[in-house]
Image (tube, helix red, strand yellow):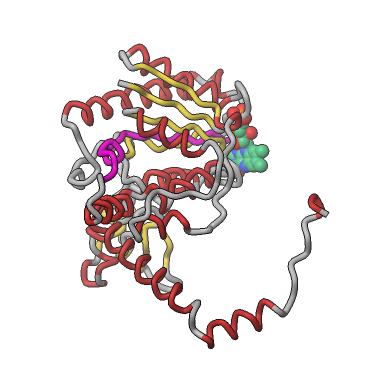
Amino acid sequence: MKILGISLGTKNGNNDTMCRVALEAAKEKGAEIEFIHLMDWNIEYCSGCVACSRGLVMGKGMICTRKDDFNALYEKMIEADGVLVVDPIFESGGTGLFHSITDRMGPGHDTGMLLMLDGKLKEQGKEGLNPRLFRQKAISFVGIGGSDWALRTETDHAMLAMSPGWKVVNNEYFSWCKDVIMQDDKIERMKEIGCNLVEAAQFIIDNNVMVPGSENIDLWKGAEGGCPHCHGNNFYIFPGTNHAVCELCGLEGHLELIDGAMKLVNDESIGPEGQIWHCHDLISGKAAHGKDIFENEGRLMNLYKDPEFQARKAHYTAVCEPTPPPSKA
Ligand SMILES: Cc1cc2nc3c(=O)[nH]c(=O)nc-3n(C[C@H](O)[C@H](O)[C@H](O)COP(=O)(O)O)c2cc1C
C-alpha cells in the first residue's frame, strides 16, 4: 500500500512537518510513503480553455493545453492508495496553489466525464481508458493556519475530491498553529489522521472498490457534519429563508435545529437538487452534470456560426482593447 503526502507550505515549514508526522505514522502501520513538496513542482493555473471537457464529452481524449507537472502529480495520486493533502490556510480557506490543483482536477479528471470518454472510445471500436483511473481512493485534508480565520478551509479542500469522486476520510483545520510542532495534541491528531488513511486505503484494496458502485460506502472518520450526505458544514442560505444548499456536494434542502444541532434536511420535493442522487460526488449526479455540459458546449459551438452571435461578439470586442501586461511591455 502506498500513501502519498502532499504539502503546499513553505519548505520544511509547518505544513511539511505535519505532513511528515502523518506519513511517519502511516509508515509505522506498514505503508510505503512518498512526500511531495508541491511548491517545487511547476503547477500552472487552469486557463479555462475547456479543451478537457470538450475532449472528454466528444470522445477525443484526455486533453490539457497546460504543459507542466500537473499530469505527473495526477499520476502520483492515481498510483497511491491513499492521499493526504496538507495546505496552509490563506484568507480563511485553501491557498491559491490548492485552488489551482482543484481546478486542474476539475472537468478533465471528473470520473463522470472520464466514463463518458470511456464509453465514446469503446463506441468508436477503440480501447477504453485504463481501469486504474476508476479505482476508488482514500483522501484526507488538513489545513494549518496561524490565526483563527479558517472557516472556508474544509469546503475548499474537500472540493478536490468531488471531481474524481474519491472518499474523504478526515478533513480538518488547525488554528493558531505557528508553533504547531510544539503542540502535542495536534501532533497526535496528525498521527491518527495518518493511521485512519491507512485503514481506509486497506479497505479499498481488500474490497477492490471502484468509484462507480461505491456510492453507499462511507469511509469518513471525522465528526458528523451539518450535511447528511458529505458532512459539509458550509451552506448557502437563500436570503430571508431557511432554504439552503451544501456548498460542497450541492445537496439542497432546509436548515433545521435537530437535537440542538443545525442540520440540512434533504427536501426531495424541491426537485433533483433536493435528492441525494444529484450530489456532485456521485456518478448519477456527475452524469446529469456531464449531460448539461455536453448540451451547453454543443449550443455554444453552433452559436459561433450564428450571424447575430457574431455581430454581438464583434460589437463588444471593439469596445476596448486590454491593457498589455507591464512585464511583457
Ligand atoms: C497570504 C497569506 C494569508 C494567510 N491567511 C491566513 C488565514 O486566513 N488564516 C490563518 O489561520 N492563517 C493565515 N495565514 C497563515 C498561514 O496559514 C501560515 O503562515 C502557514 O500555515 C505557515 O505554513 P508553513 O510553515 O508550512 O509555510 C496566511 C498566510 C499568508 C502568507
Q: Is residue 145 above or below residue 326?
A: above
The image quadrant where one finds ligand 1 is top right
Residue 9 position within the rendered picture, expressed as x and y whole percent measured from the top left: 58, 31
Corner quadrant of residue 216: top left
Task: Kindly identify the residue that appears in the image at 39 percent across and 31 percent down.
Answer: 83
Whether residue 199 appears in this view of the structure is yes
- Count of residue discs: 0
On whether residue 142 falls in the magenta region, the answer is: yes
Residue 193 is left or right of residue 65, and the answer is left
The residue that appears at 27% across and 29% down in the rendered structure is 200
Q: Residue at x 53, y 57 (%)?
A: 48
The residue lying toward the viewer, choosing from 292 and 204, is 292
Q: Position of residue 257 (x, y in %)?
A: 31, 58
Which residue is more in the foreground, 285 or 117? 117
Residue furthest front in the image:
125
Quadrant position of residue 135: top left
Residue 219 position in % (x across, y down): 25, 36
Q: Residue furthest bottom?
A: 308
Q: Which portion, as a residue range, is magenta?
A: 128-145
The one of 110 and 302 positioned closer to us in this rendering: 302
| Quadrant hosting residue 236 | bottom left
Location of the N terminus (image quadrant): top left
* Residue 244: in magenta span: no
Whether residue 228 can be seen here: no
